Image: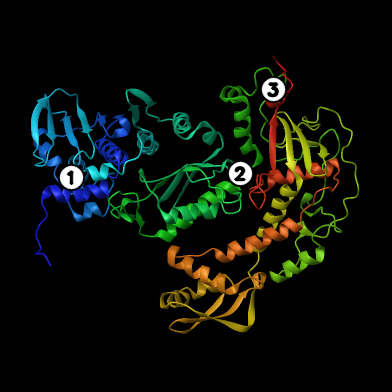
Amino acid sequence: MPSIRLLSPRLANQIAAGEVVERPASVVKELVENALDAGADRVDVEVEQGGVKLIRVRDDGSGISEDDLPLALSRHATSKIASLDDLEAVASLGFRGEALASISSVSRLALTSRTHGQEAASRVEVEGRDMEALISPAAHPVGTTVEVRDLFFNTPARRKFLRTEKTEFNHVEECVRRQALSRFDAGFTLRHNQRVIQNLRPAESMVDRERRIGALCGQKFIDNAVVIDAEATGLRLWGWVALPTFSRSQADLQYFFVNGRVIRDRLVAHAVRQAYRDVLYNNRHPAFVLYLEVDPATVDVNVHPTKHEVRFRDGRLVHDFIFRTLHKALADVRPDDHFRGAVAQSFGREGVEQGGSPGSESSSHPQPWNGQPAIPAGGSHASGTGFGGQVAPQQEWRASDQMAFYQSLGGGGVSALHEPASLGNAATTAPSPLNQTASTDGHEEPPLGYAIAQLHGIYVLAQSSAGMIVVDMHAAHERITYERMKRALAEQDLKSQPLLVPLSLAVSQKEAALAETHGEELQQLGLQIECIGPETLAVRQVPALLRGADTEQLVRDVLSDLIEHGQSDRVEAVTHELLGTMACHGSVRANRQLTIPEMNSLLRDMEATERSGQCNHGRPTWTLVTLAELDKLFLRGR
């Protein structure tokens, strides 16, 4: 075996560069973070040939003094931390002191800088195998400019792994996008091959921030986003989450920042997925731009050289806070929250702000509903418990099935789900005046307007001041029934059912220890599990509602969640999946003829129900066809 020897500084820097500098975008990230740490109000990024030929980052920050210039290019040299205490509470984006040294080892680097106390600027250049720093005077305002030319010129093997110019620039653009989203107080400019791609001014007000997000993430995202801002136990989560109807086929519009640092974290991703669990359709992905503010001492950012990962001191607390905040925000979404995006996409931004559409004779923006029942001109508002219990007994889930379900929960029936009277065979439509959007008792128009007809026994047609609203009555009723079942379950203890023959499971020692440690928590989930050996568990009780489920797989999934996240929602997820199936079978079916009052009762229940924009499977329950869209179909206003 060869003898042990120290690596040369150049070789050590190039090894470090393999971790820090993967492609041109990695260089841009490190340089922009340095500029922001220096207090820059403006950061200009210019690249050529996707960043391979040239990367120039200029800022108006505090600058670097002439004496510190050579040291700035040395490995493990930084002004951001000085002791272990500083490392345990890092508030800056950079702190490792490796970026400039690593970049300079695989490129031709020149750094020009000037501080407020200097009359002239200084320039340091590093190039070649010896990596000797050459310092010379230069002309430059207060701030710093870093030029990186011919990336990987001295490591041709690394250069072969680079993609096309377009691909590499796309990565650079994404990097600048993330930094611009992380710091609204700074302005950013991005140029590629002498062409301006982005020119963003500082955004202090909420309007300016939303304008920047619209420019970076697309105007449709901001039109379909809900603003959130919540604080609890030293944590603050704020930002924008898209409505479930604005889901994506891939996770390409998800930005999460911790104290201004963009991260990719499995704990955060799991909390977000859990919050969107029953409102997304068929493996779609949510879109969000979220900011988590925590005490820097409670989060470890020194996990990976790229600083994309963090470790929270109390991960379970953070997970629970993120989940509950997003879950509540999505639950509070009502039909009028969907109107902003629907109307904006039809009218354009000017039309939304003015409350109308060009060329339309009557297209005012729908007024918010004050929650009071309004009586349309076509008939009276349905009384009783609403549409939630109005199901045809001969076609839908029987009342005896409902009672069996509630008895399994340990309670009796619930008034909202009692045995209904037959709906009868009312006509599909009912005669009514055309001005159904106005109520006769002075109340404002509800968000979903008033029903005027039923189409093919499947859709409810409603009229509002915004246009025509089409409701999938089965999907809408399914969500209403599902949410009522969930509330009924939450109001009662989850009953357990003993197994006639306990189920024996072979597990690892770690899983066995976890089951014993979290015994009380598992009992609250309806699972009684005993450790009967170093690697053996006995399952003695399961939730009564899940007596037909795969018990072994359920227990193993719960233990897996406990290992990875410190908690598990598997029982809740499987329970809700079962409730969703019950709600689907217990909801009004196609070809069921409804009266006008019954249709209006459905609309009012939708307006009062959480997550009513989607059914239990994530399908939309209603859509708006605006007057502007109808005008286009018939060439009105031309």
Q: Position of residue 506 (x, y in %)?
A: 49, 80
Q: CA distance from mark 1 to mark 3?
A: 61 Å
Residue 527 vs residue 591: left or right? left
Q: CA distance from mark 2 to mark 1?
A: 47 Å
Give the structural element (helix, strand or loop) at label 3. helix
Q: Quadrant of residue 340?
A: top right
Is 106 rendered above or below residue 443?
below
- The residue shown at (23%, 40%) is 152
- The residue shown at (52%, 68%) is 557
Tag 2 residue? 333
Specify the quadrant that holds the C terminus: top right
Is 565 rendered above or below residue 172?
below
Q: Position of residue 568 (x, y in %)?
A: 51, 65
Q: CA distance from mark 2 to mark 3?
A: 30 Å
Q: Position of residue 585 (x, y in %)?
A: 75, 58
Is 122 rendered above or below residue 562?
above
Tag 3 residue? 632
Tag 1 residue? 78
The disc, 1 or 3, on the residue closer to the chain's N-terminal end is 1
Q: Nearer the viewer, mark 2 or mark 3?
A: 3
Q: Residues within 10 Å of mark 1 (few under 14, many from 20)?
A: some
